[in-house]
Amino acid sequence: MHPAIAWIADELAALDAGHLRRAVRSITPLLGGRCHLNGRELVNFGSNDYLGLASDPRLIEAVAEVSNAGSGASPLVTGYGPWHDRLEAALAAFEGTAAAIVFPSGYAANLGTVAALADGACSIYFDRLIHASLVDGARSARSARLQVFPHNDASALRELLQKDAGRLEKKLVLTDSIFSMDGDVAPLVELCDICDEMGAMLLVDEAHATGVLGAGGRGVCELLGVEHRVPIRVGTLSKAIGVQGGFVVGERSLIDWLRNRARTQFFSTALSPVLCAASVQSLEIIREEPWRRERIPQMRDRVLNVLHELGFTPPHSIIGPNIPVVLGEVDRVLEASRLLEQAGLFVPAIRPPSVKEGTARLRISLNAAHDDDAVQRLIDGLRRVLVAGTDGRAAHATESSTLT
């Protein structure tokens, strides 16, 4: 190893000692919420493809209309074409907003949007469990003051904003709508009340709710009736929509500002037209086939009922497709994941730093393509593995953290 980077070997050894070193595994997605892994076919409970659209043949057919695979340049140079225009128009129509802007990824959407909004004098207030991309966006706003409030504690946010009421600066509040590692939901009605009262901008990341929640699939903001009260809504094309990319929707002035100030958008090569075409088709399917999102609560309730019977206590506010099973120690969750894989089920183990020390967990992600047999196999596997693994002791959910 080159001597200048010899320190990396020691750091990797430390990760190995704590069973925290990651390695990619080659997984081939299959229809029906399944996958190939290590030469075996498994039921896939690890994917964020919540509506089962990533492998839908109609998305592949839509791509055939595209004449070029790459966009060739950044959006403000020559990279923006007809398919980008179609996708942004489709997103604005789907979300019921004046305009939309597409980013290369959901991470880039959050990073660039937060930094652009916090330009100049600004205080940023964020839930301690927001996604790392929002945290990094806040940290990249070099002149901003960062204030963290306890998870889903609207009263603590109010106190922070009241203390800063005399400060002549912009105020920006950041939250996920669904916190994917815990599965719970932000108190968006209360957050809207506070932001309206205190004159703060509210950004809601709907990454794990877009396509899944609300009568039209627009997420928690739609479900709770606060769409018109949230000025900045971020979403992703990479989860329920089944493709790749991120987006922001809102007033046209907001979108124009981001086109001119969101560095992760205009300094990146524009999203591939292939991905744009597939996303347009996916949005059409989501609108025409509501049964996909309607199926998820049925599966979720079956799984939650069994977990409660086994003595586990996932958050009561889980309304989306993600269910955490907190086991605590890294060794324990790795073993549980391995045993489930032996039973034909892919349920990933989530370890620090994705969650806080002592809260390692299985994370179950449900997919509308899972049939009743797949859900029953999951339930049977959980009964065997969790009962054997707890020795009669119940595990209890505690807060995770993606901040460090």
Image (spheres, rainbow, N blue to C red):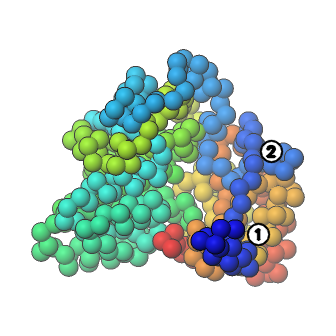
Q: Which mark is residue 36?
A: 2
Which quadrant does the N terminus fall into?
A: bottom right
Q: Residue at x 23, y 73 (%)?
A: 161
In the displayed structure image, the side of residue 206 where residue 325 appears, left or right: right
Name the spot of residue 338 as percent of width and height, x first.
Answer: 82, 64
Q: How many marks on residues?
A: 2
- Left or right of residue 315: residue 103: left
Quadrant of the rendered image containing residue 122: bottom left
Residue drawn at the location 41% of the way across and 76% of the way down? 150
Residue 26 vertical position relative to residue 185 in the rendered view, above or below = above
Give the spatial CA distance, label 1 vs label 2: 19 Å
Q: Is residue 308 above or below residue 249?
A: below
Q: Secondary structure at mark 2?
A: strand
How crowded is the residue under tag 1: few (<14 C-alpha within 10 Å), some, or many (20+)?
many
Nearest the eye: 278 or 56: 278
**Residue behind mark 1:** 334
